[in-house]
Amino acid sequence: MKRSHGFYSKRSKNLTSKKRGITKLLRVFAVGDNVRIKVDGAYGGVPLRFNGRIVKITAKQGKGYVIEFRDLKKTKNLTLSPMHLETV
């Protein structure tokens, strides 16, 4: 019998394949560190436009970090979780 190719046909397989370890969530950075934005596509929430940028951590906010960088002559701030950051 032919397999269905509907909208939800691979949904359960995709949900189980997104299992990740917690080591990325437990990373600790200090205020003033330079880090690189590395977007983890399994979790999303970060524009790919900023992927690969080296940024400076300015503050800690909850479980995430506030980062600051210049983009087109403007200073921008983003709040990211540690799973999207890596040390330089």
Image (cartoon, grey):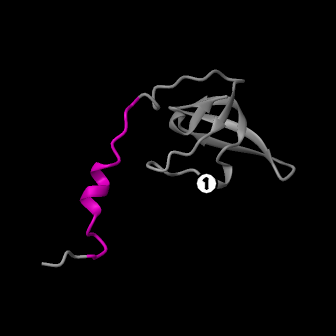
The amino acid on which the numbered mark 1 sits, given as a three-letter code, is Pro
Quadrant containing the N terminus is: bottom left
Residue 32 occupies which quadrant of the picture?
Answer: top right
Q: Which residue is mark 1?
A: 47
Whether 3 is among the magenta residues is no
The stretch in magenta equals 5-22
Residue 5: x and y in percent read: 27, 76
Quadrant containing the C terminus is: top right
Question: 74 or 1: which is nearer to us?
Answer: 1
What type of secondary structure mainly makes up the magenta span?
A: loop
| Picture layout, residue 62 above or below residue 8 | above
| Picture layout, residue 71 above or below residue 26 | below
Q: Residue furthest front?
A: 1
- Taking the spot 46% from the left edge, 26% from the top edge, the residue there is 26
- Taking the spot 45% from the left edge, 48% from the top edge, the residue there is 43
Question: 20 or 46: which is nearer to us?
Answer: 20
In-image side of 32 versus 75 (left or right) = left
In-image side of 25 versus 77 (left or right) = left
- Taking the spot 39% from the left edge, 31% from the top edge, the residue there is 22
Whether 13 is among the magenta residues is yes
In-image side of 87 versus 21 (left or right) = right
Q: Residue furthest right?
A: 73
